[in-house]
Image (cartoon, rainbow, N blue to C red):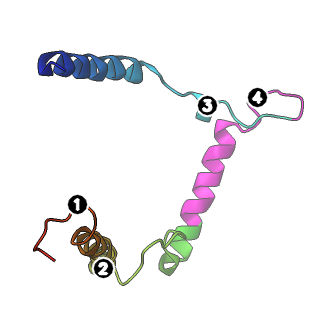
Amino acid sequence: MNSKVLLTAFLIAVFVVGYYGSSVVAFAQYMGNVGGQGETGKFTLEEALELQRRRIELVKENPDAGSGTPVIDAAGVGGAAVITAAVLGGISSAFFIKGRSGKYAAYGRG
């Protein structure tokens, strides 16, 4: 296939996705909870602000509790970097080892 045609199609696709993707906005977060009869607006702005105030007060009262979602907590950024390096290093070494043998490996290299 002609590379100019392929490049043109790719650029058109990028511009179309960018144009339509930026015009789509989700307003669902402002509708509130849906009631039993299908009505919306049950969860008002004042209720949401009150919940946020309570959450802030709880965090101020318990500063050692953290955010409540410790996904990777090994004493901060250094520990997270070590864990990430170990995981990604294991994956890349597995790919390297598997790539040295197999149907398409060059003869005489392993």
Tag 4 or tag 1, which sits nearer the N-term? 4
Tag 3 or tag 1, which sits nearer the N-term? 3
Give the spatial CA distance, label 2 vs label 4. Answer: 48 Å
- Where, by quadrant of the figure, is residue 9 drawn? top left
Tag 4 or tag 3, which sits nearer the N-term? 3
For badge 1, the amino acid type reads Tyr
For badge 2, the amino acid type reads Ala
Tell me what residue is drawn at x 59 percent, y 61 percent.
55
Q: How many marks?
A: 4
Tag 3 or tag 2, which sits nearer the N-term? 3
Q: Residues within 10 Å of mark 1 (few under 14, many from 20)?
A: few
Percent of width and height locating residue 60 = 51, 70
User: Which mark's residue is nearer the viewer, 1 or 2?
Assistant: 1
Tell me what residue is drawn at x 74 percent, y 37 percent.
33
Give, as a single range, the part of the protein colored magenta. 36-57
- Where, by quadrant of the figure, is residue 94 drawn? bottom left
> What mark, if any, has residue 28 been given in the picture?
3
Tell me what residue is drawn at x 40 percent, y 18 percent.
20
Percent of width and height locating residue 103 = 27, 63
Secondary structure found at label 1: loop
Residue at numbered disc 1: 104
Give the spatial CA distance, label 1 vs label 3. Answer: 51 Å
Secondary structure found at label 4: loop
For badge 4, the amino acid type reads Thr
Tell me what residue is drawn at x 25 percent, y 72 percent.
101
> What mark, if any, has residue 40 been given in the picture?
4
Give the spatial CA distance, label 1 vs label 2. Answer: 28 Å
Residue 68 part of the magenta-drawn span = no
Tag 4 or tag 2, which sits nearer the N-term? 4
